[in-house]
Each structure stands twice: as C-alpha cells, then as structure tokens.
Amino acid sequence: MTDIEQNISALKERLGFCWQNEDLLRLALTHGSYAYEKNLRSQENNQRLEFLGDAVLELVVSDYLYRTYPGHSEGELTRLRAAVVCEPSLARTARELELGSCLYMGRGEERSGGRERPSILADAFEALLGAIYLDQGLTVARRVALLYLEPVIKDVLEGRVERDYKTELQEILQKEGSVSISYAILHEEGPDHHKTFTAAVYLGGKEMGRGQGRSKKEAEQQAACRALARLGYLQGKEQ
C-alpha cells in the first residue's frame, strides 16, 4: 500500500461511513495536474465534483445559519455564509481532514507546494463533499460538512477569520447606495492543471481593481482588495 493509499484509508476512518462507490472518493482526490500528467480524460479529475460540492456546501451552510440564527437579517446571514465558505476557511477545514496528503497530484505541482496551496485544498474539500453527496446523500454530506466546519463557524461568529474582501466591498457600496458591482476574468495563463487567473472588479462599469490568483475566487478576492484600497478603506495595500 502506498503512502497516499494509507492516508486515504485514514481519511475514510475519519469520515466514519462506508463508501458504496470508492471511485467517487478517488475522483474527488484527483487533482488536474495528476490527470494531465497521466494523460487521463479531461473529466477524470475533481473539477466536476468541486462544482457540485460548492452547491452542496452553500445549501448546507445557508440552511444551518437560517435555522440557528432566526434573529439575523438576510444581509447578516449572507456575510456569515461568505466568511464560512471562502477559500481560507475551506482550506483550513481541508487541513483538519489532512486532505493535502491524500491528493493524487502531478510531480511538478507537488514540488511547487501544491499540497499546501489554499486554492487546491479548498477545491478538494468541495469535491469531497460533492462525492459524499452522490454516494451517501445530503444528510451525510451535511453531517460531515458541519462537523468539520464547526470551528470555522465559531470563529466567524467571534470575528476570528481571514477577511472576505468581496463581501466587505459589497456591504460598503450598499451602505453608500451603490450596488453595481461586477467581476470579470480578464485572462488565464498556463496549462489546465497550473493556471493563473487575472480578474477585474467594476463599479458602475468602471474598473476599480485587478488581482491574480491560482483560482478564479482568489483572483476576484485580490481584485476586491485592490478596489477597497483605492477607495480608501484599506491601509497598507497597493492601490
């Protein structure tokens, strides 16, 4: 048994249920760089499961916050959800599950620190939830998500989380009576398994900031950060 297989076996024990189709688990743990290196089909990586898991996660967290905090407004619930499901929070949760050590990853990505890269870890957690949903249903997916997100949710409520610049920008502009915000991916560089994205944020059709990242979410967060700095709401950030 290889090291990764041993790590996956330990992951299955932590999750606490028996898989009906373990191919789904393997797919959830297959990064695009591995599929590229092994000349697998484009669908034989975790990107489609990440897409599904993102929707599952949003539903689970929205339902939990709605039921748990009946006195919170729609805006407050939106802010809390954004902080819980943002990339830093999901990467932290993936580290709790030790997902980095379970990923099938290309050698180049691994050498560049891919097993600890927040965007890869966050995507892997979403892909895992997508796989659990398909294999076990929503009830089990909800249990796993909330079990491992509980420390994050607690820290969000107590203000101990990394900043979500997109939500901050949205809230500031809403207070000022302007909500015309849009994001665009300007270009992508590199092969599918090792892309760099450049995003821009527009306020009323005017570009206010650009950012780069290894994922679209990361690039948009950086663009929002630049916009906040340009508007004078951040200190010490490049404008």
Image (spheres, rainbow, N blue to C red):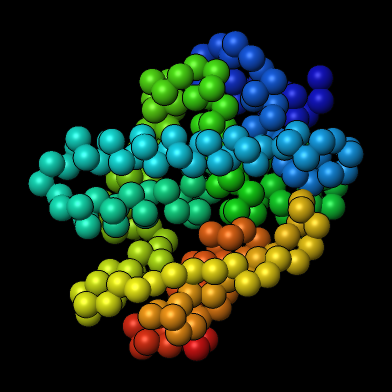
Residue 74 position (above or below residue 196)? above
Return the residue found at the far front: 205
Q: Between residue 33 and residue 17, name the one nearer to us.
A: 33
Residue 52 coordinates in the image, percent (x, y): 53, 36
Residue 173 position (above or below residue 15)? below
Q: Between residue 137 and residue 165, name the one nearer to us.
A: 137
Residue 37 coordinates in the image, percent (x, y): 88, 43
Residue 139 falls in which quadrant of the image? top left
Going 19% across and 35% down the picture, which residue do you hit?
67
Going 22% across and 40% down the picture, which residue do you hit?
66
Going 49% across and 69% down the picture, which residue do you hit?
183
- Residue 173 seen in the current view: yes
Q: Is residue 15 left or right of residue 178?
A: right
- Residue 235 seen in the current view: no
Residue 212 coordinates in the image, percent (x, y): 62, 71
Residue 17 position (above or below residue 95)? above
Q: Is residue 3 left or right of residue 224?
A: right
Q: How many dots with numbers?
A: 0
Return the residue found at the far left: 71
Q: Between residue 165 and residue 43, name the one nearer to us.
A: 43
Residue 134 falls in which quadrant of the image? top right
Residue 3 coordinates in the image, percent (x, y): 78, 29
- Give the position of the N terminus as an image quadrant: top right
Residue 51 position (above or below residue 131)? below
Q: Is residue 185 left or right of residue 133?
A: right
